[in-house]
Image (cartoon, coloured by chain):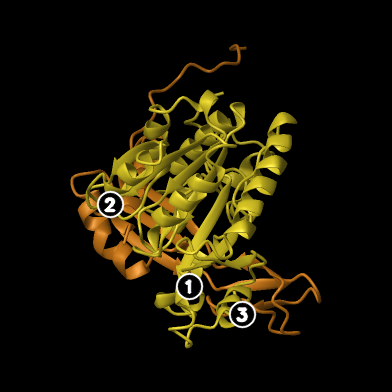
Amino acid sequence: MCDTCGCNITDANAHLLRPGGRLHQTGEGREAVTVLRNLLSENDRQAAHNRAHLDRHQVLAVNLMSSPGAGKTALLEATIEALGDTLRIAVIEGDLETENDAERIRARGVEAIQITTGSACHLDAHMVHQALHGLDLSTIDLLFVENVGNLVCPASFDLGQHYNVTLLSVPEGDDKPAKYPVMFRAADLVLLTKADLLPYLPEFQPGRAERCLRDLASAAPCLSLSARTGEGLAAWLDWLRQTRALLVSQQAAGSSRRPAIQPEGQALHAGEGAF
Amino acid sequence: MHEYSLCIALLGQVERIARDHRARRVARILLRLGPLSGAEAPLLRHAWPLAAAGSLAAGAELVIEAAPVVVRCTRCGAETEAAPNRLLCGACGDWRTRLVSGDELLLAHLELADIEPEVPRACASPSP
């Protein structure tokens, strides 16, 4: 059948050509196309590829997000100190400029790949893919991605990680989840960091931070800790150990895990028949 | 903040679809955008002409449809509208809700123009 005379229109496909249909021709020879595709679908495809790499080597990948200065690198230093003997750790560092954070991690004897984004405000799946090529995944149990310090953009980009951990430091104020709902909704775990400052900043109430988080319909656990004093660190380390054990059993069974932010969300919005 | 890179991704999708449909021009682009998508409509509108300059989508009208924030309660089942930072059930007040709408970042619809006629192909069915 040809595409010019109409002999290819059948009862089965005629609905596509009616107004609102995917192949409907509007006035003036225009053609209307219904797409329903996420703008980030290219990124998401790359992220799925990254996740498959990580799963093949049974690596747990954790994406750390926060505002600049909330203590992501300090948390990593303390985590390496505590777990470095039992788990093989590597870190991908995202910053606009400098290798400072990567050098702090390397000083602890852990491999770190620095991504300098220039002026880009977030990491995306392609950058992380490139960084993954610099790592031998068969020698790694636990991969941290320290995202660019920013409470806005990093939340929108899937990197291929299994879990999102968002840090909120005490000096920032306890209402951050209400101010940055997109970021805190994306968290599988929220860490209230610099808890050693709580006595000096009584206006920060951990209970209020947690309530703001629940207002986002998030069931993510919320832990207080201080990387400086070690207070509360044990619960974070337990979370990491349990999370890793659970994921490795899933990976061994051929499945994986994505950050909890409604895995069915995209399917809800993007109907089938997308390009 | 990352609206320009979103516009570049949008342009890539639009160009691919236009090529598939042999369109020389894109007349209209409809996006559906929710407040929890992390992108802002005014910034997208500003960034779009820069991203599309010189492409077959350069003159396209960019229409951005705002999606409401709607949650479905896992306790009472009600579907209610909510504020982006307060996703509580509007009926019973419970926080254990699922987002039904509000985080969309979708290329929903395209109108293509100046469609090149396809080179006529021989009919596959044998002539009588």
In this view, A135 is above or below A182: above
Chain appearing in orange on the rendered image: B
Say whether marks 3 and 1 touch (CB < 8 Å). Answer: no
**Label 3 in the same subunit as label 1:** yes
Tell which subunit mark 1 falls on. A
Have a look at marks 1 and 2 and say if they share a chain: yes
Q: Which mark is residue B110?
A: none
Pointer 1 local density, CA inside 10 Å: few below 14, some 14–19, many at least 20:
some
Of all chains, the one bearing label 3 is: A
From the top left corner, tell me how far across and down residue A27 is, in percent.
40, 54
Q: Colour of chain A?
A: yellow
Instruction: Give the number of the disc on residue A196.
Output: 1
Instruction: Name the mark on residue A120.
Output: 2
| Residue, disc 3 | A211
Q: Is residue A132 above or below residue B97?
A: above
Reply above or below: A41 against B92.
above
Percent position of residue A162, x then y: 58, 45
Find residue B99 and report its image quarter. Answer: bottom right
What's under tag 1, amino acid-wise? Asp
